[in-house]
Amino acid sequence: MKILAPIRELDELEMLAQAGAEELYCGYVPRAWVERYQGAVWLNRRSTRGSSVETLENMRALADAAHARALPVFVTLNAPYYTAEQTALVLDLAERLSGECGVDAFIVTDINLIVRLSELKLAAATHVSSVAASLNVEAVRFLLNFDVSRVILPRSLTLAEIESIKRGVGGDCEIEVFLLNDGCAFEEGFCATTHHHSVGAFCTSLSGMRTDFEWAGGYFSSRRQAWLRRNLEDYREWVWYLNGNGCGSTAKGLPYGPCALCAVPDLARIGVDSLKIVGREASPFKKLASVKMAADIVHRVRHGVPKPVAIDRAISLRGEPEHCHAGYMCYYQVDRDC
Amino acid sequence: MEVSLQVRDAAECRATLAEAFAWERSAKLRPYLDSIAPRLTHLPVSRIASGTEFCEHLIPHSIRAIRDACDKPFTLLTPYVGDRGLEKLRCLFAELRDGDEVVFNDWGVLNLLRREFPGLVPVQGRLMTKSLRDPRVMGIYGDSSTPAGASANATLRVLQGSNLDNAAYTAMLGNIGVALAEIDGLPQGNALESALALAAYLPFGFVATARVCQAAGLGYAKTEKFQPASPCRHECQTFLAEHTYTNSPFENRDQVFWLKGNTYFFTHPAHLIDSLLEAARAGRIHRLNIQPRVPMLEVS
């Protein structure tokens, strides 16, 4: 079970490797893309500026340095879809990233691109992005037709569902799940909105909209209205947690946000292959703090620390247990006693 | 042009569109539905659809009564599912007849259909037809009077397109028996060139859907709410939420989003319905999927 860390540039490599990163992933956006497409048309689900590596030279340097430390590098080509014109650009990009830069895998959502990459037989492997919404074992089996080596499961799966899928696919492909930072209120692959800065994420935008309710039958009492309002406020609080606790940090400066540290013992037992830390665009400090927290728990679990002890340690690491106990900051519900 | 009507029980299978447009009881939606109904009610219904596209908790225990009452070609709508939902669908598929359509919104559902139910006809659902459908901002790209719209031809082509734009992809679907794909009318306009036949939903477009359901939270204590795939009592059937985009940075502060259960929808403005109708008459859209109620129906 590896720790997969986000990286944006070579300068971040040393600190991430020393902190315990065992795999790396990043975005790459060439100038040609930025010049051709505006606004909401993103190559890899992050703004085209400031979140990704920007030249092949820098990508090659990053991959070489990572490989010298035995760390594989994966590149996100994970837009929900590419049109025919874009697909030609992305396939050319993939050939160069694989052949000239030596990246180890592409993280891909678009089934068309997955199929086309399987035909190209590049050295780089294909990992299926969580945005592809592989929610059941049959979906993973379908994707295995296209030479994929890893499937990243969506955040919306429970531990029991992850276990069912892992058991169902056995050793036919690796399974990766989310470990830290940022959630999605919607099923990532079925949210057809943009996070473009002009409007922000739809889920957080909703919290600022005027909301009216209509009861479907019978008298809409003030008690029922209050019940719906209270539920809406709870939902907005949940979205606040998903959004990194309002993009906040603890008094010690540690990052907040959705977390599966308590679930590491279960994920290890299930046989999950990789644990993803979200945040290519995050500050180097947030990346470093996240990898350190992940490594602390993963190393303890590898050394056989009992599950309740690992959970207590995880809560202690997060620094503010009231958030852990709120029930809204966990990717997965964990049963402490089994 | 084929016209499909979504029903929720056997009695509705023989309804006309004029009758069907009276089904939605929401006082908030009635003015809108009454305003657009005259554009559609003259169309003859030629196909019946039932089921759910958005929620595995709304998968019916049986579809037999509707299937038996239906004297037209039949389409079963299916949602994205976990392994348990897939088992429920397997039972429903066994009740269908060879030649019936199944709309899949999950690769696992397609895989199951191909392997175990080769007599059923798979149709790519609208959740699998990837396009941005964000009415907060997409309409601006389609409006050539705005700076963003005027200077962004390449961008607009992408936003009006979808994964169906790729010949290799549609050929792959064709090879596994998928000849029809479903789409939403888009605020920024639709590119309708595709090797597959197209079916367009109206008048509700989907914006976002989730395995975590806001409505289901009503049945839980605060710390237990909003857990993925949690059981529910179909609280989605009890209320409708209307979100108005009052915090828009643009001029569309009257844009409305409708939440029913786990899914947000937008309603098609009249001009979008007219353009879909025109495309259907011209043969560029093969089928219109009419859903005269918010499509989060509990099938009985």
Image (tube, rainbow, N blue to C red):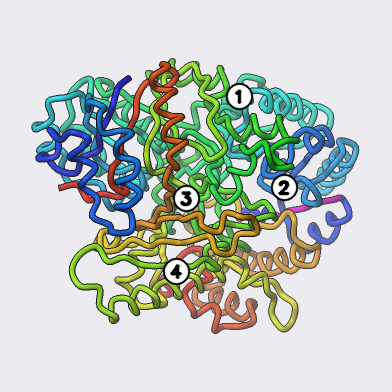
Q: Are the numbered discs 1 and 4 placed on the same chain, yes or no?
A: yes
Q: Residue at x 16, y 39 (%)?
A: B63
Q: Which residue is mark 2?
A: A25
Residue B99, position as x, y percentages in the image = 23, 20
> Which residue type carries mark 1?
Ser
Q: Residue at x 63, y 63 (%)?
A: A181
Question: What range is drawn magenta here?
Answer: A5-9
Helix, strand or loop for the magenta stretch, by majority: loop
Nearest to viewer (mark 3 / mark 4): 3
Q: Are marks 3 and 4 in contact (CB under 8 Å)?
A: no
Which numbered disc flags the more N-terminal residue, 2 or 4?
2
Nearest to viewer (mark 1 / mark 3): 3
**Does dot 2 land on a helix, a strand or a loop?**
strand
Report which quarter residue A1 is drawn in: bottom right
> Which residue type carries mark 4?
Val
Above or below, B47 relative to A234: above
**Does dot 1 land on a helix, a strand or a loop?**
helix
Q: Residue at x 37, y 41 (%)?
A: B203
The alpha-carbon separation of the residues under discs 2 and 4 comes to: 27 Å
> Which residue type carries mark 3?
Ala
Q: Which residue is mark 4?
A: A334
Report which quarter residue B132 is drawn in: top right
The alpha-carbon separation of the residues under discs 3 and 2 comes to: 27 Å
The alpha-carbon separation of the residues under discs 1 and 4 comes to: 37 Å
Q: Is residue A334 left or right of residue B26?
A: right
Which numbered disc flags the more N-terminal residue, 1 or 4?
1
**Relative depth, front residue between B169 and A137:** B169
**Does dot 3 land on a helix, a strand or a loop?**
strand
**Does dot 4 land on a helix, a strand or a loop?**
loop
Q: Which residue is mark 3?
A: B208
- Which dot marks residue A118? 1
Above or below, A63 relative to A146: below
